[in-house]
Image (cartoon, rainbow, N blue to C red):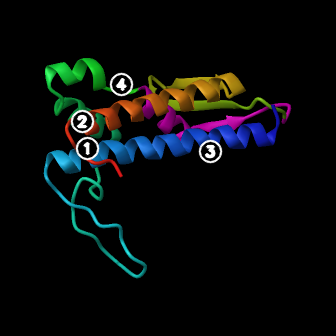
Amino acid sequence: MDIDDHAKRVGYLHTNLTALESSRRYFLLKVDKQTFRVPKDGDIDAPLNWMTKWISLEGLIKRYNGELTATEREKFSITQEPENFRDAIAHGRVHSPKLQFPWTLTKFGRQKSGRVLIDLNQQMTVEWLDNAYKLVGQHKEKVDACSKSRGFSIT
C-alpha cells in the first residue's frame, strides 16, 4: 500500500458515507412529502426539511428504519456499522509509529474510571478500506432500492 492506495480508498469511503446520508435524508424528505432545492451561490439560509435539518446520525438511522413496513424492514433496514466508520474517520486518530503504510485508525470513546474506552483500533489495510466502502455502498443501495420500490425518483 502507498499513499495513492490509501487516499483513493479513504476517498471512496468518504464519498459513500456522504451519499448514504443523502439517500436516507432524501427518502425521509419524500416520506414527509417535502421538497428540496439545492442552494444557489449567495444563499445564506435554506428552508428546514430533511435535507437541511440537523439530526444525529443515530437519530437518522432510527427514523429511516422506523419508517419501514415489516416487509420493507426485511429487505431494506440498515445497521449502525456505516456510522461507526464515519465516526472513526471524523473523530479518530491516525498513526504509524514507523511512518509507513498501513496506518492505524484509533477511535477513542468515553472515559470510564479514569481510563478511556477504545471504540476502534484498526489497521487501515487495502482490504479493510475496501470492505468498509463496499459495505457503506451496500447500505446506500438498500435505501435507494426502498425509495424506488415506493415510487420515489432518486435522481
State how far apart marks 2 and 1 are (Cα).
8 Å
Side of 95 where 23 appears, left or right? left
Look at the numbered disc 2 and give the secondary structure of its residue: helix
Q: Which is more N-terminal, label 4 or label 3? A: 3
Q: Residue furthest bottom?
A: 42
State how far apart marks 1 and 4 are (Cα).
16 Å
Determine whether label 2 and label 4 are within 8 Å by CB.
Answer: no
- Asked if 148 appears above or below 32 in the picture, the reply is above
State how far apart marks 2 and 4 are (Cα).
11 Å
Q: Is residue 91 magenta?
A: yes
Region in magenta: 81-99
**Which residue is rendered at x = 77% and y = 32% of the image?**
96
Look at the numbered disc 3 and give the secondary structure of its residue: helix
Q: Position of residue 5 (x, y in %)?
A: 76, 37
Badge number at residue 27: 1
Badge number at residue 11: 3
Q: Position of residue 119 (x, y in %)?
A: 50, 25
- Asked if 7 appears above or below 51 in the picture, the reply is above
- Asked if 14 appears above or below 146 in the picture, the reply is below
Note whether residue 148 is visible: yes
Give the mark toward the camera: 2 or 1. 1
**Which residue is rendered at x = 34% and y = 40% of the image?**
57
State how far apart marks 3 and 1 are (Cα).
24 Å
- Asked if 120 appears above or below 90 in the picture, the reply is above
Question: Which image quadrant for residue 35?
Answer: bottom left
Depth check, front residue: 70 or 87: 70
Q: Position of residue 1 (x, y in %)?
A: 81, 31
Determine whether label 2 and label 1 are within 8 Å by CB.
Answer: yes
Q: Which residue is mark 2?
A: 64
Determine whether label 2 and label 3 are within 8 Å by CB.
Answer: no
Q: Which residue is mark 4?
A: 79
Kind of residue at badge 4: Thr
